[in-house]
Image: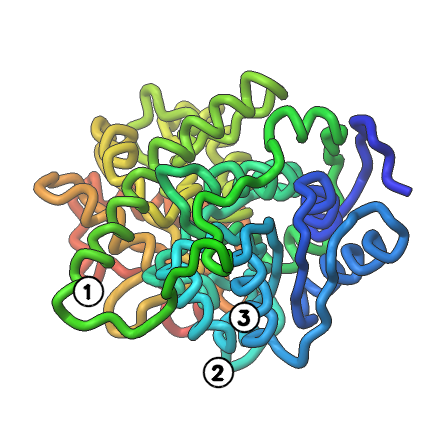
Amino acid sequence: MIPQETFSDMITANKAVALAVVRAKPKVISAYPISPMTTIVEYLAEFVALGDLDAEYVRVEGEHSAMTVVAAAQGTGVRTFTSTASQGLAYMHEVVSATGGMRLPCVMFVANRTLMSPGGIWPELSDSMPERDSSWIQIYIGSNQEAFDMIIQAYRIAEDSRVLLPVMICGDGYILTHSSEAVEILGEKEVDDFLPPYKAEHAYLDIDRPTAHGIIVPPQYHMEAKWQLHQAMKNAKEVIQEVNDEFAEKYGRNHGGLIQPYRMDDAERALVVIGSTSGTVRGVVDELREKDQKVGMVILRAFRPFPSEKILEALSKVNSIGVFDRSMSFGSAGQCFLEVRNALYGKSTPILNFVAGLGGLDIREEDIEFMFNKLVAVENGEVIEDPIIFVNTRGVTS
């Protein structure tokens, strides 16, 4: 049995997610196993069977059905949970998009894994990035403690009346999902104080208040519906920050909200980083600081909504900027780079796109130093014709 009081343990991000779901008390869980998220739903099936969680665990034949079950259950006014990765998320796409458009505040954990082809089971953001326009909030985590904390926060964000959008918490497969770290699991009472029982703002399948939903809408009303989605996503910026700040005040863990700057007060050059690579970059920043190099890092936590104002503020005083991407919009650039460059529209600060770690390739300390050295070269006048630099790539990187 899971202890009801706060406790700490050495666990994987997958187990941290499962324990957070238990604390959040959803009534319906449905998922189809796929590496590297499978153990999440194995844990949850066990917790339901042992009585640690009072929920209906629905076994289905695929990810499309899993998302359908969760969306339908959420539409009745109950809290839900699902999880997937890679091809599973791609298979879900039709219902993922519909769930966002129907304003169903579901929560899903995505164990980021490369999307074929070529195939692979290792970490890459090519699975979740294509869903950035599906009306889901996307928050990327960098540690197992964040995995627990952000599942709890995700329900508060999604269910806020100013938002009412589903939330996708994304974590690098294997790097987080199968590696153990010390994680504090908040007690049941502590989570109940922060996350009260779900009260649906709109129970679509209420027979006493019938509504039509998920239907074809003629052009005369379509623009208004999409405008409302955009406004809700913009509202989420404020809600994400509020929820982060309240969580930090209650439990002493501040993950930054939309972004998390590191050693940026006097930084002359900075890397914008997403996901678990932030841990490696943090170490390199500290080492370079000891060598009197004024470098810093900005961790991009929320990708949707994109925190343009926060990014602009954080990078306003640096001489050069590098943006790390673990995915690629082929024929264009990395998705994070495109968003950061858009946020800096009108600024003349040199900005480079470092694409690294595709297919799960290790991102080493020397790779991070390479990125910072490229920024120094740009500051010293070196002309780089293509701002998109593939790092540690045979026959390409120079």
Q: Amino acid at mark 1?
A: His
> Which of pointers 3 and 2 lies earlier in the amino acid sequence?
3
Q: Residue 312: which numbered mark, if any?
A: none
Q: What label does residue 68 carry, if any?
A: 3
Task: Tell me if mark 2 has few (under 14), some (14-19) or many (20+) residues whose alpha carbon lies within 10 angstroms of its own.
Answer: few
Residue at 38% across, 68% down: 214
Q: Nearer the viewer, residue 387 or 335?
A: 335
Residue 256 position (above or below residue 119): above
Write the residue at 79% across / 48% down: 53
**Residue lying at the far top of the rendered structure:** 249
Residue 327: where, in percent of width, then height? 41, 63
Mark 2: which secondary structure?
A: loop
Name the N-terminal-most of marks 3 and 1.
3
Question: Disc 3 residue type?
Answer: Thr
- What's the CA distance linking mark 3 and mark 1? 23 Å
* Quarter of the rendering occupied by the C terminus: bottom left
Instruction: Give the SS element for disc 3.
Output: helix
The residue that mark 1 highlights is: 222
> In what element is the residue under mark 1?
helix
Three-letter amino acid code at the position of disc 2: Ser
Instruction: Assess disc 3: are there few (<14), some (14-19) or many (≥20) residues with their C-alpha within 10 Å of its C-alpha.
Output: some
Q: Is residue 397 visible?
A: no
Give the Cα separation between the discs numbered 3 and 2: 26 Å
Q: Nearer the viewer, residue 171 or 322?
A: 171
Among all residues in the image, which is located at the extreme left? 346
Which quadrant would residue 388 be assigned to in this image? bottom left
Reading the image, the residue beneath label 2 is: 117
The residue positioned 72% from the left and 30% from the top of the image is 186
Quadrant assignment, res 57: bottom right
Residue 95 position (above or below residue 197): below
Give the distance between the C-alpha atoms of the residues marked 1 and 2, in whole angstroms: 35 Å
